[in-house]
Image: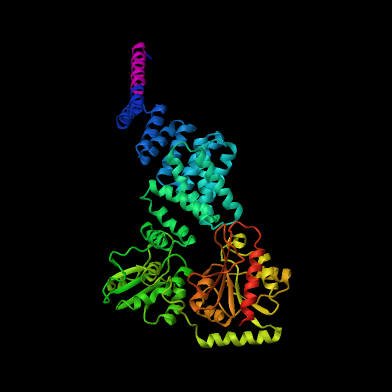
Amino acid sequence: MSDSTMIKRQVMSDEIEQTFAVALEMEQGGNFQQAADLYSAILAIDDRHVPAYQALSQLQIELEKPEAARQTALRGLDLAESDLRLTVLLAKAEIMMGHYTAGREYCRKVLKTSPTELTAQRLIINSYEHEQNWIEVNRVATDMHREHPNDRQFLSQLAFSGFRLLRDKHNFVPESIIRCQKLMAKAISKSETEQQKDKFLPCLAETFWYAGEPKKSLEILDDYLNRYPQDIEAQFNACFIHRTLYNWDAFYDAFEKGIESGARLSYRGDIARWDLSRPKSDIVLVVPEQGVGDEIEFFHNLAIVVENAAKVYVACEPRLVPVLNISHPEVIAVPVKRVDHESMAIPEEVKRDITSWIAGGSLAAIAYQSSGKHHYQASYFSPPNDQVEKWSSHFDELKKAHNKKHVIGLSWRSGLAGASRNIHFLSVDDVARLVEAFPEALFVNLQYDDCSKEIRKIKKLSGVDIIQLEDIDLRDDFVGTGALIEACDLVITAATAIFRLTNAIGKECHLFYGWDKDSDHNVPVKLEWETGFGYYYPPLIENKYPVVDSIVKHVTGRLSSQ
């Protein structure tokens, strides 16, 4: 190679490095696009300049051009396949494009070579956050927080994912609530900015509500909403606190925010919302929300619409159509299956016919504002007499055979897996204590999932055989289950769909529920809008035997007076 050629190459190399330095200065000065143009110009001259690939890919990510960043990183890796920075940038670009699995694969490739590379660990957590896979976020963040206890970001991710698992998985056991609360408080104390702190305040408020401290919860949430009045989701979450505090006007105001936030239902009608000011010629669609139990409850208020509209469609869970046909034959049932994260599919012929719509849960506010009652009809469902008589006769035979006087329907938890230690439910030990205290009663299982193992354990602990009826589908046959409930003397239940169905029928119901820290389970409370009594207790109590004993004492008195 001649000296002149070498000199030319050196000059070109110097110019490239000078251009690279200028590009870096532009980038540091915030002139991102100009810097990107210079990096591209460098690569047009020297396509083997790895630092330019690194800088350009990083800048393209900053400019939110992940596809370009991905291509740049791949070109650079063709030259330097083991370059960690380019691999990290490629992972970040993949994650920004929604290719989460691919992004994690590149991160793991980095970690094989450099196990202490925190950026790759952060990207893995970030990818799971995008997927809302809180189990994996929590798993990785737990490991990272253990290794880096002073890292604020890992602590923040651990606290938030723990909260989401608590809420989304209904993991309402005392130690989980307390642990989540402590992590939230720690994350807030370690936050560098007010904005970082404020991110956790609605979550912290919610954990105080779970723990039975509604006043403290509302204090935190009100402070947050004073600074972020536009946060509709937080406004909606306040409704649960107001309900616990019996602040009914505030409850209904906040509850309506759930429609705007999308938390209550997946339907958005583009026509008028129905209320009592609408003309009686209206054709109304009543839209379901949340779970089956919620639908059963809002049926208490359907008569308000029926009495004030020309025609009423009621969209509902298909399993509830038979209940609706019996209880409200004047409405048109529209069975709809709801799919998470998808808009509710209302038939086109129904949408063409209606002139207004209302969310089913919103009917309670109208009932309360117009009559002072939360339920327009205290009860509304009368199961078929022949089915009721069938179970009554069967129970009479069982009582005679076993020398019993009473029949009690029993549901001690929801159908959630691992719900036995939930603050709102009874454990197997609790149930055993309950049933053995009623030697003159038959207990009928109303659980709508497979609980045969629990029933066997209850018998082993108490000697009491809870009756499981094989010729009824407790999960899907609500009419048949209603007839079974009607044939009982009373029902003892957790706050599940069984509770709602019992009240729809008007059967005496004894509800146990973790309310607030000042609740006294020794004093049964006449239920605010249902037929029966509530045994409220502090949510975080570990020993529910005193709650069970209170139920036994009160129910025994009720049965003796029948």
Q: Position of residue 478 (x, y in %)?
A: 50, 77
Q: Is residue 556 magenta?
A: no
Viewer-nearest residue: 514 or 79: 514
Figure check: 87 above or below 404: above
- Quarter of image, res 534: bottom right
Q: Is residue 446 visible?
A: no
Tell me where the magenta segment starts and ends, as one range: 2-20
- The quadrant of the image that shows the N terminus is top left
x and y percentages locating residue 497 in the rendered image:
51, 70
| 121 left or right of 285 in image | right
Q: Of residues 366 and 76, which is closer to you in this image?
A: 366
Q: Is residue 246 visible?
A: yes
Q: How far from the left and from the top, in percent, is residue 444?
A: 62, 77
Q: Is residue 35 left or right of residue 92?
A: left
Q: How many marks?
A: 0
Q: Position of residue 400 (x, y in %)?
A: 68, 87
Q: Is residue 14 magenta?
A: yes
Colour mapping: rainbow
Residue ID at (66%, 64%): 546
Give above or below for 159 relative to 27: below
Q: Which quadrant does the C terminus fall into?
A: bottom right
Q: Residue furthest front?
A: 523
Q: Residue at x 58, y 52 (%)?
A: 176
